Amino acid sequence: MVLKTFGWSFAITALGLVAAVLYGGWEAFGIVAILCVLEISLSFDNAVVNAGILQKMNAFWQKIFLTIGVLIAVFGMRLIFPVVIVAVSAKIGPIEAVDLALNDADRYQELVTDAHPSIAAFGGMFLLMIFLDFIFEERDIQWLRWIERPLAKLGKVDMLSVCIALVVLLVSAMTFATHAHQHGGMHVDKAQTVLISGIAGLITYLVVGGLSGYFENKLEEEEEREHEAEEEAKRSGKKVSVVQLAGKAAFFMFLYLEVLDASFSFDGVIGAFAVTNDIVLMALGLGVGAMYVRSLTVYLVRQGTLDDYVYLEHGAHYAIGALAVLLLVTIQYEIPEVITGSIGVILIAWSFWSSVRRNKRIAAAEGGSGSDDKTEVPSGV
């Protein structure tokens, strides 16, 4: 079952890692491996959400999502989007960006280095908003209780995450402007670039979140209409075109899933810029990772869920928060790729280990008491 579901992912992983070695040696191999782990772990909650919605769709729409939908996710978001970011930031065409990356690495690196403050500000703000909205939300299961409990109470203040993100952006821009004065060659307009790019990242997050909310509401409305139509049909004894209603609801599900997938893809793509600026390595790592999202989604639909590992979502979001901070720091200071890549992997591994320990405690408590009550077992670390 595992080999059947993940076979293509394993094959693409092997090809991707071999391509990385051929492209840039063992250092490139390490970067692609880190990007794979990062994308898989950050997309884990994506696969869980996808599976939950996908179970409600018929076989036709499931196949549409797992084929066309994945092509959009892999090629649109993970391969084309990084090129677009570089092209827009460096003020060059997408084709020229790819050409430079493949044929003139030095010039490409120079352009990306010049554009890095805008990329880092945009990405840092987007990732920071994902982390803040997660950490300020009240939730039943808490991982690091000493952090999450007080922050969940603070989260009741409206728009707190936006306010904090804007303060962080302002501090980042002011700090950058101060350094720009000291170095002479770097002008104050770099601070303006940081501010504009950061605000663009914030707006992008809010727009994506708004679209997700819109499609979610439409989906609920369609499901409610379908349910009412079925009830009316039962009462009147008439046949209703449930297929049409199901198709309409499934279409909204598909659109909702695509918007969700795009929003989940943003964190992986932006996080990848904290690890490397090379769009070839980025495409390899993120492309391989995206294949696992598909495989995980299929696995969850067929086998149930992996809700036992309840802290993985927390670990992924803490990794996102760490990447956001690192991206903002890299506006002025260079941070080794090993550090940026390792922090996320360590946090996610820690959350996985905590989930396993929690499951063992629950099993021990049930074995000792012979009860099915899990509420007495601590859910946090």
Image (cartoon, rainbow, N blue to C red):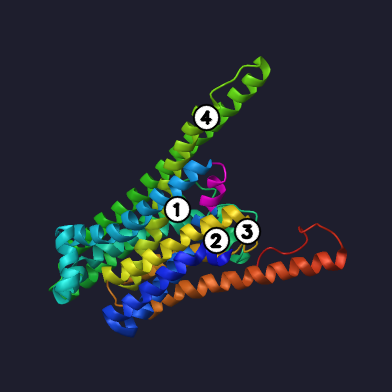
The residues tagged by marks 2 and 3 sit, at their Cα atoms, a distance apart of: 10 Å
Q: Predominant secondary structure in magenta?
A: helix
Q: Report the side of 91 relative to 238 (left or right).
A: left
| Mark 3, other Cα within 10 Å: few <14 / some 14–19 / many ≥20 | few
Dots 4, 3 in contact, CB < 8 A = no
Look at discs 3 and 1 and give the one toward the viewer. Answer: 3
Residue 361 part of the magenta segment: no
**Helix, strand or loop under label 4:** helix
Q: Which residue is mark 2?
A: 313
Disc 4/disc 2 C-alpha distance (Å): 35 Å
Percent across and percent down for residue 59 are 52, 43
- Neighbor class of circle 4 (other Cα within 10 Å; few <14, some 14-19, many 20+) is few
In primary-sequence order, the first of circles 2 and 1 is 1
Q: What segment carries the magenta color?
A: 49-57
- The amino acid marked with disc number 3 is Asp
Q: Amino acid at mark 1?
A: Ser
Element under disc 2: helix
Q: Which of the two discs, 2 and 3, labels the residue nearer the N terminus?
A: 3
